[in-house]
Amino acid sequence: MTGQQIVFILLSFVTLASALIVVVNRNLFHAALALMVSFLGVAGLYVTLDAGFLAAAQLLVYIGAISILIIFAIMMTRRLMQATEPSFNTQHVAGIVAAVATFVLLAVVVAGYWPLRADPSLPNVARVQVLPDGTPVETVLQGSVAALGRAFVSADAYVIPFELASVLLLAALVGAIVVAWPKTEDPS
Amino acid sequence: MEFIRSLFSLTLFDYLRTVWGDAPWVELVLDLIGVVTLSTFCLLIVIALIWLERKVIARVQDRLGPNRVGGRYGLLQTVADVLKLLTKESITPAGADRIAYNAAPILTVMAALLMWAVMPFAPGVIGVDLNIGIFYVLAVSSVSVVTLLLAGWGSNNKYALLGAFRAVAQLVAYEVPMILSLLVPILLARSMSTVDIINAQVVPFLFVVPLAALIFFISSLAETGRTPFDLLEAESEIVAGFHVEYGGMKFGMFFLAEFVTTLFMSGLFVTVFLGGWNIPIINGLLGAVGLAPLDLNIIAFGRLLGLMVFFIKTFLIYFVYIWIRSTLPRVRVDQILSFNWKFMVPLTLALIFVVAILDKLIPDGTNQLVRGLIHLGSNVLLALATLEVLRRYARRQRQRQTGQDAGASQAPIQETVPAH
């Protein structure tokens, strides 16, 4: 077993164990903290996969923003210091459907690449594209931040999904402001 | 002899590698030595930083500052304070959330120390040169926001929780202009690696994009919770803040983290805007008289020289932090937030647009000096435009308060300004 595998197993254990705590812990605040540890474990997995940018983004977005939002939501809505809730609610059916759907989605995606095997002829190369004139372009994994940025705004790559996601986020922002805007009396 | 030499030229690790050979454990041991050395340095320098801060603030305010313990300059005052904090009883209040309460100070110090991993001290003297260096710093520093919430919630004290809410609102808000203003040097250097950014600064970015430097400096003041944004520990307003229930070294660790982060921010400012370990002016003079520029990688003891240059610059910036702390009063919480959202963020967004478009328009082969001058010009124009907008806004406000209509002449309005 290589060192990387040991680290991978440890990180997976941390991620899964803290995810389990999220589900079964009766103290909502502690559940939110365990969720943070779980996010941290996922960031660690990204690091072992040489995806440093993704790991930092995970840290910044999920721990720096989303977790804080969750904690704020808990603090604002529950009775402050008695945040213990029954750990099981009545949404069994919806939960099962969501779990099965996620599993099927992951299984389908992973099966497309099965068996997973590193191609030794392509060291550190994510994939090889062939331009119309026949020259192959290698996307290098190491230092791929610039490549990632170009892929987001390049017309041949992901510009449409990227812009769609941006518009969706903008719409959500505007919607949030409209919902939160204090209702004023009609001036007339 | 060789050992002493390598110690002084900061090539100790290269020397140890030649001595120990390339066994698999060598790199691991060297990494551990590096981590321990860097962390210990960061923690110990805080003793000096606190003494410096108290002494400088005292002199600015016409006092003497610590002058009893350790000679007439009070050199050992902080050592005594640290010993006092360390020997105090470690208390966890009844009713506190034990996990959150005890984890918060530890996590704060961890986050503050982790950031130093990408700090370039001298050529080749850096924890790890990540290609996402600046982004890594921002990601790690965002963890410190969580620790504030942990401390505020875990204390089981409504004033601590209120203090934490205010602090988190401030930190989350000022993260935005900080990230955006750091994007400008990243754009100019075409890289997020701290080493690449230093190497890209033929002219230090402070003289290329002074607006970005100013915005970064202001938002770093807020991020480290220093005056005029020190709501995090506003003793006169909210009992104390999120750490009201903490005592002894648990309390000390929050301040430890604050000082470590402030020094780090000074170092980051030097790295991103002042050319890091480089000596741009001397190199420029050497180039002007036809000599080769000083390449610190090549000359003997170049690393030591680079380290000294880095720390001289860093402490200059740190002095400015202390200077501001000793002279400016605290800003109100609503003023802090509206200053950020209504002024800093729009200005930074405009700055990014201007810099990005200009930098794309400048042809690739252009002389770095010319490129810098173009950016400097655009920055000055943007600053003037901002001042004009602010002036008009202030005039409208004044008119509204004095009841003058917009068409009134300027003379009676100016009379309403109190004479100094």
Image (cartoon, coloured by chain):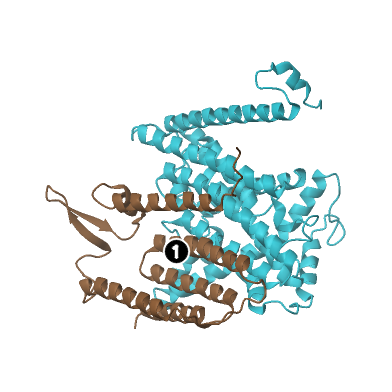
Looking at the picture, which amino acid does disc 1 mark? Answer: Gln
Residue lying farthest front?
A188
Q: Is residue B295 visible?
A: no
Total label count? Answer: 1
Q: Is residue B161 left or right of residue B25?
A: right
Q: Is residue A41 left or right of residue B150?
A: left
* Residue beneath the point at 51% across and 71% down: A36
* Residue beneath the point at 39% across and 32% down: B367
Q: Is residue B389 above or below residue A76?
A: above
Which quadrant, please, contains the N terminus of chain B?
bottom right
Q: Is residue A174 visible?
A: yes
Percent of width and height locating residue B40: 62, 67
Location of residue A76 (image quadrant): bottom right
Q: Is residue B90 left or right of residue B278?
A: right
Could you say which chain is coloured brown in the image?
A
Q: Secondary structure at mark 1?
A: helix
Location of residue B102 (image quadrant): bottom right
Location of residue B171 (image quadrant): bottom right
Which quadrant, please, contains the C terminus of chain B?
top right
Q: Is residue B241 left or right of residue B288?
A: right
Q: Which residue is mark 1?
A: A58
Q: Colour of chain B?
A: cyan
Closer-to-camera residue (A172/A4): A172
Percent of width and height locating residue B3: 53, 66
Mark 1 surroundings: few (<14), some (14-19) or many (≥20) residues within 10 A: many
Q: Is residue B256 above or below residue B95?
A: above
